[in-house]
Image (tube, grey):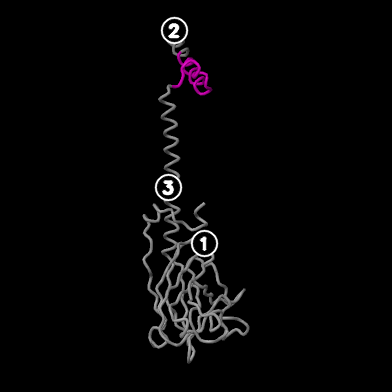
Amino acid sequence: MALMCERERSVRIETNFILALSGGASMSQPIPIGVWIAAVTGGLAGSIVTLCMQRILEVLRIWRLSRSLLLSPEPIPDACRIRVRNLGLQTVEDAIAYISLMYDPQTDILDGPAFIGIHHRVLLREDRLCWAVAAPDPNPFRISIFPGEKQALDLVMVHPDRIEIPSEQGWATLMPGTKSRVFLKKKRYEGSVNLVAKNVLRRSFGLVIDPNDGTNLVTLTPQPFIGFFTLLLSGRLPEKWSS
C-alpha cells in the first residue's frame, strides 16, 4: 500500500513538472508581477552592461592602436624622412601625413616646380606628404601599416642653396614632370607633422627642420595625447568606429 502511494505521488510530481514546463500551470498559478519586473529589469541591466563593455573595449582598442604609432627621424644622404612604426596588434588603415611650416612667404619661398612658389606665396599649412614606396604606385599619399611594420615618410631634401618639401606627387627634382610642395631658403624652420588614419586618433608632432645642423636635420617632438578616460567620456572616435 505504501508503495502504491509513493508511485501516485511520483506521478503527480511528474505531471505538475510537465505542466509547468508547457505553461499549463500558469493558467492556475499566474506569475507574480514582481517576477515580471525583476525579469525585465535584469534583461535591461544586462543589455546596458553589454553595451557599456563593448564601448569600453572599442575605445581601448582605438586608444592603444593610436598610442602604438612611433615616429622618428631617419637621416639619409642629403635628406631626411620619418620612419613610422606600428607597434600595435592591428593594421593602421589608410595612414596620411600632413605637414605645416612657418616661414615668410615673401622672402623664404624660392622659384621651382612646386605648388607653392613665387607665383603662389602662401604658408605651408596641413598639406599632404608622400610615402617612400616604389610599388605598385610610387610615392602614394596614403598607405596601410601592418602590425610590426615600419614605413618611411618623405619629409625634406637638402640642396646646396635650398630645401625641398615633397608633395603627393613626390620630388620634382627626382621625378621630371611632377611638382614638389615648396622650395625654401636653406635655414631653420619650425612646424608640425600630423598623422591620421581610418582607425586611429590624430597623432601630432612638433617639427624642426634645420639644414645647417650637421647632427639633427630634423627633430620631432610628440604632442600631448588624449587620455583613455577623457576619450571614453568625450565620444571622439574615428569615423570608421563611430557608427
Residue 99 lies left or right of residue 115; in this view the side is left
Tell me how far mark 2 sits from mark 1, CA to CA. Answer: 80 Å
Q: Up-down: is 243 above or below 21?
A: below
- In percent of width and height, residue 3 lies at 44, 11
Mark before the other along the chain sequence, 3 or 1: 3
* Three-letter amino acid code of the residue under disc 2: Met
Residue at 57%, 73% in the rendered image = 140
The residue indicated by pointer 2 is 1
- Does the magenta portion include 30? yes
Residue 184 lies left or right of residue 225; in this view the side is right
Mark 3 vs mark 2: in front:
3
Mark 2 vs mark 1: in front:
1
Q: Main secondary structure of the magenta part?
A: helix
Q: How many numbered discs?
A: 3
Query: What secondary structure is marked by label 1?
Result: loop
Q: Up-down: is 146 above or below 132?
A: above
Query: What secondary structure is marked by label 3?
Result: helix
Query: What secondary structure is marked by label 2?
Result: loop
Mark 3 vs mark 1: in front:
1
Camera-side residue: 57 or 168? 168
- Tell me where residue 40 sits by quadrant: top left
The image's mark for residue 53 is 3
| Label 3–label 1 contact, CB within 8 A | no
- Does the magenta portion include 57? no
Q: Residues within 10 Å of mark 2 (few under 14, many from 20)?
A: few
Q: Is residue 6 visible?
A: yes
- Tell me where residue 38 sits by quadrant: top left
Camera-side residue: 203 or 73? 203
Q: Which region of the structure is painted magenta?
A: 9-31
